[in-house]
Image: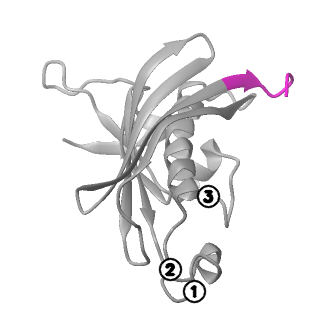
Amino acid sequence: MSETPMGDTGGETRGDVGATVLGTADIREIMKLLPHRYPFLLVDKIIEIDSDNSAIGIKNVTANEPHFTGHFPDQPIMPGVLLIEGMAQTAGAICARKTATGSNLVYFMTIDNARFRKPVVPGDRVEYHVVKQKQRGSIWKFHCDAKVDGQLVAEADIGAMIISKDEA
């Protein structure tokens, strides 16, 4: 399936009947969608986004990240809360893209059913698989899986809310 920049998609279809054009986003596009910056921007790339339904975000984990100096120096493991945050940021990119007026903020609201299955270490490439479960008004619910080499390392159900910057 062909890939196009995120800003150029939006549910368009190709010549194939019913085939949705999937979008992608590099770090520059992600930084337009999300307010997070180093060291708290935890999505390096989005390799697939399907309208406002799902996305796959990528985090390349390196030994140079600041959390590894204390978690844990002799056996670095990415903190589970940062995996949850990476999943939430991927979901936030879906929300921000769908409501891309520049006048809205996406707030992370809830975490349910969080499970951590395997440690994530420097050198791993984490894929955040995020699927919208439902949306009611400004409230969005997602199921998220974090995978390394196809293996589930963490999962959670998260909620987000979109509000106007004027209301913040």
Q: Residue, x 85% and y 28% (percent of image)? A: 168
Q: Which residue is at the front of the view, 45 or 61?
A: 61
Q: Which of the labelled discs sits on residue 73, or is there none?
A: 1
* Amino acid type of the residue tagged 3 in the rendering: Leu
Q: Secondary structure at mark 1?
A: loop
Mark 1 neighbour density, 10 Å: few (under 14) some (14–19) many (20 or more): few
Q: Which residue is at the front of the view, 129 or 47?
A: 129
Mark 2 neighbour density, 10 Å: few (under 14) some (14–19) many (20 or more): some
Mark 3 neighbour density, 10 Å: few (under 14) some (14–19) many (20 or more): some
Q: Which residue is at the front of the view, 76 or 10?
A: 76
Q: Residue, x 22% and y 56% (percent of image)? A: 150
Whichever of callouts 2 and 3 sits on the residue coming sooner in the sequence is 3
Residue 113 is situated, as x and y percent measured from the top left of the image, at 46, 35
* Amino acid type of the residue tagged 2 in the rendering: Pro
Residue 136 is situated, as x and y percent measured from the top left of the image, at 55, 10
* Amino acid type of the residue tagged 1 in the rendering: Pro
Judge whether 78 appears above or below 33 on screen. below
Q: Toward which corner of the image does residue 34 lie, by quadrant?
A: top right
Q: Secondary structure at mark 2?
A: loop
Give the CA separation, mark 2 to mark 1: 6 Å
Q: Which residue position holds label 3?
A: 41
Q: Which residue position holds label 2?
A: 76
Whichever of callouts 3 and 1 sits on the residue coming sooner in the sequence is 3
Residue 69 is situated, as x and y percent measured from the top left of the image, at 63, 83
Judge whether 54 appears above or below 120 on screen. above
Q: Secondary structure at mark 3?
A: loop
Q: Residue, x 26% and y 24% (percent of image)? A: 13
Specify the segment rendered in magenta.
Answer: 162-168
In the rendered image, residue 167 lying in the magenta stretch gets the answer yes
Q: Is residue 21 left or right of residue 44?
A: left
Are the two marked residues, 3 and 1, in contact with CB atoms closer than 8 angstroms?
no
